[in-house]
Image: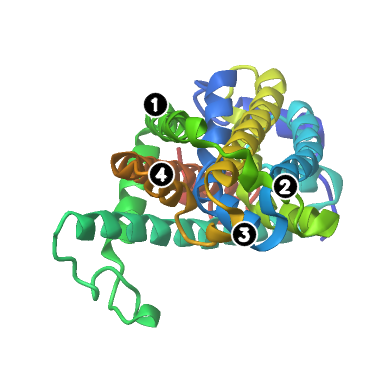
Amino acid sequence: MDLFRTKSIAQMREAAANSGMAKTLGALDLVLLGIGCVIGTGIFVLTGVAAAKYAGPAVTFSFILSGLACALAGLAYAEFASIVPASGSAYTYTYASLGEFIAFIVGWNLILEYTVTASAVASGWSGYVTGLLLSAGLDVSHALTHVPADGGIINLPAIFITLLLTFFLIRGTQESSKLNRILVLIKLAAVFIFLLLAGPHVDTANWSPYMPFGAQGIAAGAAIVFFAYIGFDAVATSAEECKRPSRDVPIGIIGSLLVCTALYVVVAAVLTGVVPYTDLNNPEPVAFALRYIGYNLGSALVGVGAIAGITTVLLVLLYAQARIFFAMSRDGMVPANVCKI
């Protein structure tokens, strides 16, 4: 047995062409898929934390620096996806270049990544929803909304949202894409509501000093906010379901990164202009900023947008993980009946 045998690009193209996957996704769907996975807790949480602890108002440069690094990785993904338009993302590319054994390790690492991240995101979704229910005066059981490590028994809301989104994914990619579009629009609406309400209250005095932690702080902030970009690689897992993968996947990856970077920079600039950066080290800096200037209703709307944002992140993570399983099952890494279409 040759552990480092590779599959030719021709073999992979043929397998993708005969996989039975419905080709329903266009470039816009992929851009929204990328935005759905990238814009989540990063814009609603990390922006404030990075400003308060690492970069100050210069966190805008941290986002630009981190976005540039992600764009370089995105270009690599885009090139691979145009050459090998098959599901599997980095697993498939590794199989074509480094061989079966390394691909096996990369594939299971991807599955682990999506599993752990989806679990954390589902837990975050549960926390937001529980918080809204408590704010509405409803009695929520601690035992049924927290895992044993947090003093509870089981986190039912996290299980519920995971099963619900899995149901949509089983229904089909087109239906899941429609749900993602709706939730992304709600999420972007929440971001624009924040910008419209908070923009007129920007006080440039809050941007001084602009670089309280110096260039080292900007670099440290970039390392922190890099995690806000994680998820753009999930776009590459949809290659087999694209109408024109060699064109649409690169547009989806780079397009979503450009949109997300622009939103991160603008939100960070407004956030640090409205509230002194030293006050932003809290779990909901965007909602806090609106309460700070007296918009309690706006704060609630942003909270709803955050829930929609977290939901889209979880949806795309589950989608991507299923595509990794599918690609591995086709190569015999996992039982074939696990991923029957």
Image quarter where the N terminus lies is: bottom right
- Gap between marks 1 and 2, in whole Å? 37 Å
Mark 4 vs mark 1: in front:
4
The vertical placement of 135 against 18, above or below, is below
Is residue 128 in sight in this rendering?
yes
Q: Which residue is mark 1?
A: 178
- On the image, the x and y values in percent for residue 86 come to 67, 33
In this image, 174 relative to 320: left or right? left
Task: Identify the amino acid type marked 4.
Answer: Ile
The first of marks 3 and 4 along the sequence is 3
Image quarter for residue 297? Answer: top left
Instruction: Name the residue: 49% across, 24% down.
Output: 22
Q: Nearer the viewer, mark 3 or mark 1?
A: 3
- Mark 4 or mark 2, whichever is nearer to me: 4
Cα separation, mark 3 vs mark 2, equals: 10 Å
Say above or below: 94 vs 270: below
Mark 2: few/some/many CA within 10 Å (<14, 14-19, 20+): many
Neighbourhood count class around disc 1 (C-alpha, 10 Å): few under 14, some 14–19, many 20 upward: few
* Residue under pointer 4: 293
- Say whether disc 4 or disc 1 marks the residue closer to the N-terminus: 1
User: Badges 4 and 2: C-beta atoms under 8 Å apart?
Assistant: no
Give me the C-alpha separation between circle 4 and circle 2: 22 Å
Is 257 displayed left or right of 188 in the figure?
right
What label does residue 52 carry, if any? 3
